[in-house]
Amino acid sequence: MSAKNIIVIGAGFAGLSAATTLADMGYAVTLVEKHQMPGGRARVHEAAGFRFDMGPSWYWMPDVFERYFARFGKKVSDYYELIRLDPGYTIVFGENDRLTVPADYQSLRDLFESYESGAAVQLDKFMEQAAYKYEVGVNQLVYKPSRSIFEFTSPGLLYDMTRMDIFQSIRKHIRKFFKNPKLVKLMEFPVLFLGATPQNTPALYSLMNYADLKLGTWYPQGGMFEIVKAMESLAKEKGVRFVYNAEVTAIRIAGKSAKTVVTTAGDFEADVVVGGNDYHHLDQHILEPAYRNYSAAYWKKRVLAPSSLLFYIGLNKKLEGLTHHTLFFDEEFDQHAHDIYTDPKWPSRPLFYTSLASKTDPSVAPEGCENLVILIPLAPDLPDSEATREQYYQRVMDRFERLTGQSIRDAVVYKRSYAMADFKADYHAFRGNAYGLANTLLQTAILKPSLKNKKLDNLYYTGQLTVPGPGVPPSLISGQVVAAEILREHPNH
Ligand SMILES: Cc1cc2nc3c(=O)[nH]c(=O)nc-3n(C[C@H](O)[C@H](O)[C@H](O)COP(=O)(O)OP(=O)(O)OC[C@H]3O[C@@H](n4cnc5c(N)ncnc54)[C@H](O)[C@@H]3O)c2cc1C
C-alpha cells in the first residue's frame, strides 16, 4: 500500500485533530503552521514569570476530549491532570450581589430554589430535555459531515430532531422554566460561547446548559495549553511531520486537484490538502478566484461570533474573594448585545469576564502573584487602537476594583492587550473574529461553509468556520469528521 501525502494547514485544535486521525489511518501527513508553536488561538504567552493561555479557558464537555484520545488507545490522564472546578464559576451582578455555581447538582438545585420557589424541580425538567439534546447532538449530529440534508433524514433521526427544539429560540425556552432574572441570566450565559444572542440561538443549544451545569467546568493542571501539548505529542507518535514557521501563501492547481502547497518554508506536494487555517482567508486570499468555494458577497452576509479585547495581566499580589472564572454581568446583556450585533460599535456598557488560573494552578504565576486574563466581547472589525484599548482597560478596571472591593491596578507588574488587529495579524482572522461564525439556525450544519471544496476534488476544510462550529470540543470533532470524509473519498491503495 502506498500512503497518500496529505498536507494539513494550521496546527490549531482542528488541524492537530485532522492530522493525527489521518496519520492513524495510514496517510503520510505533514502539518504546516505559520507560527513557531502549535495551538493557534489556544497558544500560550509567557512573560515576566507568568504563563497565559491566550484563548480558551473553559474546559467543557470532558467526554469529547476523552473520546478523542480513546480513539488512539489513550486516555486524557496519560497526558494531563484534569480537575473539576468547584465552584465552577461566579456571576457578579453588582456590589455584594453574586451567584456562585457549585459543582454538586443537589447544591445547585438548592441554589435555584433559593432564588425562585419551584425552580429546583424546573431545573430537573430542563436538564432532562437538555441531556437528551446533548446525547443526540454531541454524540450523533456533530459527527456528521453536513454535506447533504439526507444525512439528517433517517426516520429515527427525524423523530429525534422534532425533540431537538431547533425552531424555538433558547431565550423563549429558558423563560418557560424560570422567571427570576438572575437565574435567566445564568441559563443564558452559555449561549455567549455560541456567538449569537439568545433570541437568535435555537433552543437545541440548551445542551450547553447540560454541559455547563451537569458535566461541569474542568481545568487541565498546567493550563489549557496542556491539551495542545498532548495533541502535538500524540500526532508525532502517529508519525505526523510538523513544519513550523511555514505560512501558506498559495496553492498551485493541476486540473481539478490542489497539487502544491506553497509556504514561506518551501513547497509541499500533496495528494490531499486540508485547510485548518481560517477558512475565509484560504478561500478568498490563498486560492485563485476560479477555485473559491464562495463569493465575497457570501462572506459579507455571514454573521460572525464576536471578537474580543483581552488583557493578559500579571499581578504581584493575590486577589481576594474571586474564583477561577468570574462573569461580570452588572450591566445589561441586551445593551451589550445591541452594540455587538445590531449596531456594531465599541460598547457603551460592556459585560466582561475574568480568568484567574492562578487560583487553581500555582504553576502559571510566580509565588504570591496572580495570573489575570480579562476578556471583553466586541463586535468584529471595529477600529482598533492602543488608545481605545487603554480607555476600556481603565473603565473595566474601575468596575472590577469597585465590585470586588480591592485595588488591583497598583499591583500590575505585566500587561499585554490583544484584540481585532492581533487576530488579523496572527491568524488572518476574517474581520478579526475570535470564535468564527455565530451558531444561528441559518448557520448550522449544512448551512455552514462546507468542509469540501466544490471545484477541487482533494481540498477539504476543518476548524471553527466549518462544521460543527466554534469551540475547542467542536474543533476536535471537526478534524475527525474531515478525516473520515478523506478516507471515504481518497483511500490509500
Ligand atoms: C479569546 C478566546 C477565548 C476562547 N474561549 C474558549 C473557551 O473558553 N472554550 C472553548 O471551548 N473555546 C473557546 N474559544 C474558541 C476556541 O479557542 C476555538 O474555536 C478553537 O481554538 C479554534 O481552533 P481551530 O483549529 O479551528 O483554529 P485556530 O486555533 O485559529 O488554528 C488555525 C491555525 O492555522 C494557522 N494559520 C493561519 N493561517 C495560516 C497560513 N496561511 N499558513 C499556515 N498556518 C496558518 C494559525 O496560526 C493557527 O495555528 C476561544 C477563542 C478565543 C479566541
Image: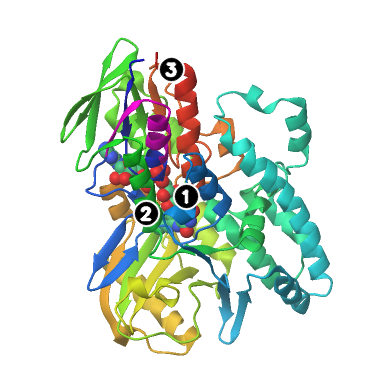
User: Within 10 angstroms of label 2, few (less than 14), some, or many (20 or more) residues?
Assistant: many
What's the CA distance linking mark 3 and mark 2?
32 Å
Please give the residue where the numbered disc 2 appears in the rendered image. 42
Residue type highlighted by circle 3 = Pro
Residue at (32% x, 56% y) in the render: 383
Q: Is residue 286 left or right of residue 449?
A: left
* Residue designated by label 3: 491
Confirm or deny contact between disc 2 and disc 1 (CB under 8 A).
Answer: yes
Image-quadrant location for residue 337: bottom right
Can residue 61 be seen here? no
Mark in the foreground, 3 or 2: 3
- Amino acid type, label 1: Val
**Circle 1 SS class:** helix
Q: Could you tell me which residue is drawn at 65 percent across and 63 percent down?
A: 213
Please check the rendered image and state whether residue 348 is part of the magenta-colored stretch, yes or no.
Answer: no
In which quadrant will I find the C terminus? top left
